Structure formats: C-alpha cells, structure tokens
Amino acid sequence: MSHRKLPAACSVADVPGGLSRRRFAALLVGGAGAAVTGLARSRNAFAQAPSTVSALIMVMHATQADGGGSIDPGIGDMPQLKKPPFSAYNTYKLLDKKVLPLEKGKPVTHGLITGRTVQVTLLDVTPDHRFHVGAAINQPGGQAFLKLLEVNASANEPFFVAGQSYQGGTLVLGITIKP
C-alpha cells in the first residue's frame, strides 16, 4: 500500500480517505469531549475550579503501514485512534510526551519535532466545569501554521490537533487537560 506524500508548503492538503487537511483537523477537534466554542465565558466558573491545571501533550506520528499496524504502548488506551477520522492511519508512534502547567490567561509553549511550536492557553472554565482552551501551532519565527482554535475540553478527555506532514505521515497532537 502506498502512502501519499502531503504537500509541505500548504495548510490544506489531502489525507487518506480523501479528506482535506482542514476538514481532517476540524473532525479531530470535534472528538472526545471537545467542542468548538462560541459560548460566553463565565467569570464565576473559574473561581469554583482549580487555579492551575496542567496540559498533557502527546505528539504522535500517524502512518499507514502494510499488514496491520500498531499503537505505541506509551500512548496508552486511546480508543479515538481506532475510529474515523483517526482510523485513516493504522500505526501511531509516540514521539514526545510533556506535561505543562496552565494558568488562566497565560499561554505556554512546547517545541515540536518539526521545529514548530504548539501554544496552549487556559482561557476560562465553563459553567459546566469544562476547560475553555486555546491551541495554536506556530512556524519558527512566530508565523501561524494553525491559527488559534478554541475548544471546551472535559477534564481528562483528550482533544486533537493534527495535519502537519511528517516523514510520510501526519503529526497528531493529543492534548488532555488535567485538573
């Protein structure tokens, strides 16, 4: 089985299954307890939540391998990877795992293997005790590769940011907010 190489210079490219990169990324954000938000923020909700939380960032390399595939044991139990759109790939290798402390309104960054930087910001806590989080990926030098996306994430449920071409596959970032 051959794997299509994704164009490196554009932010929208085809991925297995004919999805555009932008559509693939949009579907990823919708999974596992995360929803794109336009909801009003609540000032009182944050007072009821911990003043600091952490973000567990897992950087995974997704590829399509002949003869089955596997999920790196370091990733742990993540059933979302076995369902569309993630099932377009059958092999997931853990490249990096980092826990970053988050404080409301203070962005934190983490360097990626591609030279880009992921930025995560705790924006607020919703009335239903979910975490309103912003995530962005920047090119070296600060230009946006993926402009800020905002999600409402449930505690201990990952949301995903994906679409960066990497060594014949795609990087998938699983971000889990831990109270």
Image (cartoon, helix red, strand yellow):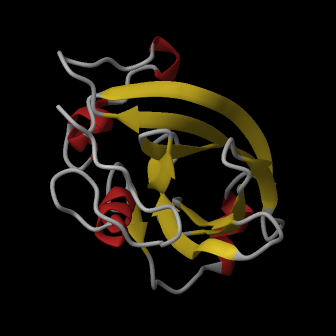
Residue 127 visible in the shown view: no
| Quadrant in the rendering for residue 142 | bottom right
Please tell me whether residue 115 is drawn above or below residue 1 in the rendered image: below
**For the point 54% across and 73% down, which residue is it?**
149
Rendering coords of residue 97 (x, y %): 66, 30
Rendering coords of residue 151 (x, y %): 49, 67
Q: Nearer the viewer, residue 28 or 10?
A: 10
Q: Quadrant of the N terminus?
A: top left
**For the point 63% across and 67% down, which residue is it?**
136
Does residue 42 appear to the left or right of 23 in the view shown? right
Does residue 155 appear to the left or right of 118 in the view shown? left
Rendering coords of residue 71 (x, y %): 37, 20
**For the point 78% across and 63% down, which residue is it?**
140
Rendering coords of residue 152 (x, y %): 48, 65
Residue 60 visible in the shown view: yes
| Quadrant in the rendering for residue 133 | bottom right
**For the point 78% across and 65% down, which residue is it?**
104
Does residue 101 appear to the left or right of 120 in the view shown? right
